Image (spheres, rainbow, N blue to C red):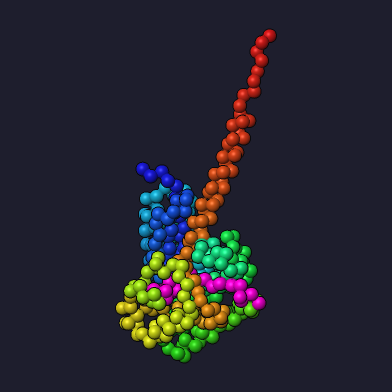
Amino acid sequence: MNKSKYFAAIDLGTNSCRLVIADEHKKYAFTEAYSVKLGEGMYEHMKFTPEAFNRGLDCFVKLKNIMQKYNIVKTRAIATASCRMAQNSQEFIDEVKKKTGIKIEVIDGYEEARLNLKGALEHVCGKTEYVVLYDLGGGSTEITLATNTKNPKIIHTISIPWGARNASEAFDLIEYDEGKALKLQDEIKKYAEGFVKDANLEQIRDKVCFVATSSTPLRYVSMIEKFGKYDRDKADGHVISCKDIDEQINGVYNLTREEMMGNLYIGQKRSTIFTAACVIFKTIYDCLEAKEITASLKSAKDGIVSELIEKYKQNKEKNGKVNQICQRNSRPASTDRSR
């Protein structure tokens, strides 16, 4: 039996649920993203629909079964925008705990940004003095300015309450419609332009690089590099120009829903939300005046795993020192029995 110790991270978003399992040397043993669509149909009543609720629950049962195959010593499961917003999120969290024993922690936008930074800077760390990272999710989008260091310091961050899933439903934007797209664009611009101002981005622009996580930039990379299909692993770490992204987005805007379903870079699962994702993504990099973007597969889940392993090693070292002290103190004192 494999006695290696493993660490698990679960990141439950509005559209996907991601699982990463790694050993204490940070070698990944398992990584997968599941299309749960937890936030599908949620916007109207701000509640998980029964169908979405059950899909989420089934996913966690699957995750539990996978995790049982490994000697996992520590797990952290987080939930983001959809669980922050849904009125019945606590009911869902309680049911997951009851069925699987997995405790879900609902984190705020700041913690989400911090974990994304921890995971996503692998490709650009030290390249520039500062980094702007944005993560386009299903129910929110985080934009963060931080120092581009091994232990990044957040200077300014915002959480925009719109992502690909809830924006596509709220703005009825599946196939491209100029009027609907402009309404979404105006909504995103309010937040993005506010970020630029409050972060004083203009003053440090020549010292900043831009990184984007989530599947959206990785899909653009696959399109631009003509991989022939969406390949997230192959796309990870690629630097792409915003001019090239513009060209791909314009192509997407000309597609029907059926054409998006059959597109090797978009597919059926993303066909209902990819147009809204394109509008949000482009609006942000236009407001940031980014010229190029590094696409990163690494995100919050990777940040979680890294921290779990770091804390485990720190505790292991601390306990080792304590045991040494206890052993020294427990040695019997020498006695002189001569009379």
What is the x, y in percent for residue 145? 60, 71
Q: Nearer the viewer, residue 170 or 156?
A: 156
Tell which of 97 and 331 is nearer to you.
331
Instruction: Please tell me in which quadrant of the rendered image residue 22 appears.
Output: bottom left
Q: What segment is highlighted magenta in the picture?
A: 203-222
Q: Quadrant of the N terminus?
A: top left
Numbered circles on residues, count: 0
Q: Is the magenta region chiefly helix, strand or loop?
A: helix
Q: Residue 28: x and y, percent? A: 42, 55
Residue 231, horizontal then vertical, whole percent: 37, 69
Query: Which residue is pictured at 40% across the width and 54% down the height?
Result: 29
> Which residue is situated farthest in the bottom direction here?
179
Q: Quadrant of the C terminus?
A: top right
Does residue 94 appear anywhere in the picture? Answer: no
Q: Is residue 157 above or below residue 118?
A: below
Q: Is residue 98 left or right of residue 118?
A: left
Where residue 221 sits: x, y (%)?
Answer: 42, 74
Asked if residue 294 can be seen in this view, the reply is yes
Residue at the image point whose x is 58% and y is 69% from the top: 128
Residue found at the very far top of the displayed protein: 339
- Residue placed at 38% from the left, 79% from the top? 272
Query: Magenta includes 77?
Result: no
* 221 part of magenta stretch: yes
For residue 33, above or below residue 43: above
